[in-house]
Image (cartoon, grey):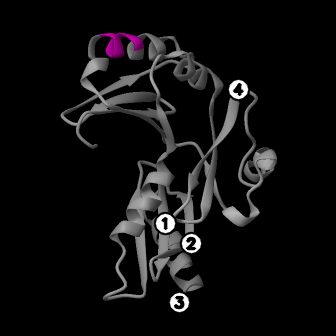
């Protein structure tokens, strides 16, 4: 986190308040009452200490659309290829201008409504949007033309393949054991070898 930043990391089973010097995790029930009360209380006591506010959504599927094919009126179509969106979710997207892509994902409507009611301008992101930018920053063409990056979760992994500082492949795989991990890793490597 940059200095004077407040970031909320939202997961299916809880959320974290992250600052440049502290992280607090809260589990939450299916409704958003605890989330709303926690964020209001935190901001009432600390808002003046921060200049940048963000919320990052984890564990929600996303899909990358090349900018040339992106049409805002087709958001439902983009996600329908990957999963069935619940009626309790809304679809939003992150523009990745430097990467010439748009990252489309859904978030809970109730959480979005809580954020909109607050007197704070939150920057909203999907975690993969941040990872893609970081992976491209870390990639180097000096030693290797192709580079593979893996981001591990408790029950999944993200694989990014970069060639000459361009993202050529990204996908998320559910991983239940070491065999799943090795299968998906070698599958991707074989496809791009």
- Tell me: 186 left or right of 49: right
Residue under label 1: 159
Residue where numbered disc 4 is placed: 88
Q: Earlier in the sequence, mark 3 or mark 1?
A: 1
* Marks 3 and 2 close (CB-CB < 8 Å): no
As measured in the structure, the alpha-carbon distance from the residue carrying label 3 to the one carrying label 2 is: 13 Å
Sequence-earlier tag: 3 or 4:
4
| Total tally of numbered discs in the picture | 4
In three-dimensional space, the C-alpha distance between marks 4 and 1, rounded to whole angstroms, equals: 29 Å
Name the residue carrying label 2.
169
- In front: 27, or 100? 100
Instruction: Specify the segment rendered in magenta.
Output: 40-44
Predominant secondary structure in magenta? helix
Q: Secondary structure at mark 4?
A: loop
Q: Which mark is residue 193?
A: 3
Decide: marks 1, 2 in contact (CB < 8 A)? yes
Residue 188: image location, x then y, percent: 54, 76
Taking the spot 50% from the left edge, 78% from the top edge, the residue there is 186
Taking 52 as reference, is 185 above or below it?
below
Sequence-wise first label, 3 or 2? 2
Please rate how many residues cluster around mark 1, counting C-alpha atoms within 10 Å: few if below 14, some from 14 to 19, many from 20: some
**Side (left or right) of 27 relative to 100:** left
């Amino acid at each position: 986190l940059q200095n004077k930043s407040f970031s909320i990391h939202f997961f299916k089973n809880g959320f974290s308040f992250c600052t440049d010097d502290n992280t607090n995790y809260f589990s939450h029930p299916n409704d958003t009452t605890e989330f709303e009360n926690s964020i209001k209380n935190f901001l009432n006591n600390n808002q003046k200490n921060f200049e940048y506010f963000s919320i990052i959504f984890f564990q929600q599927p996303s899909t990358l659309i090349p900018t040339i094919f992106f049409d805002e009126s087709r958001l439902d179509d983009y996600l329908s290829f990957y999963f069935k969106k619940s009626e309790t979710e809304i679809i939003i997207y992150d523009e990745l201008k430097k990467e010439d892509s748009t990252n489309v994902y859904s978030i809970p409507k109730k959480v979005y409504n809580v954020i909109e009611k607050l007197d704070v301008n939150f920057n909203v992101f999907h975690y993969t949007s941040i990872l893609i930018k970081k992976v491209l920053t870390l990639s180097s063409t000096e030693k290797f033309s192709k580079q593979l990056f893996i981001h591990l979760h408790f029950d999944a992994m993200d694989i990014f393949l970069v060639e000459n500082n361009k993202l050529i492949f990204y996908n998320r795989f559910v991983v239940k054991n070491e065999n799943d991990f090795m299968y998906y890793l070698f599958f991707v490597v074989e496809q791009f070898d």
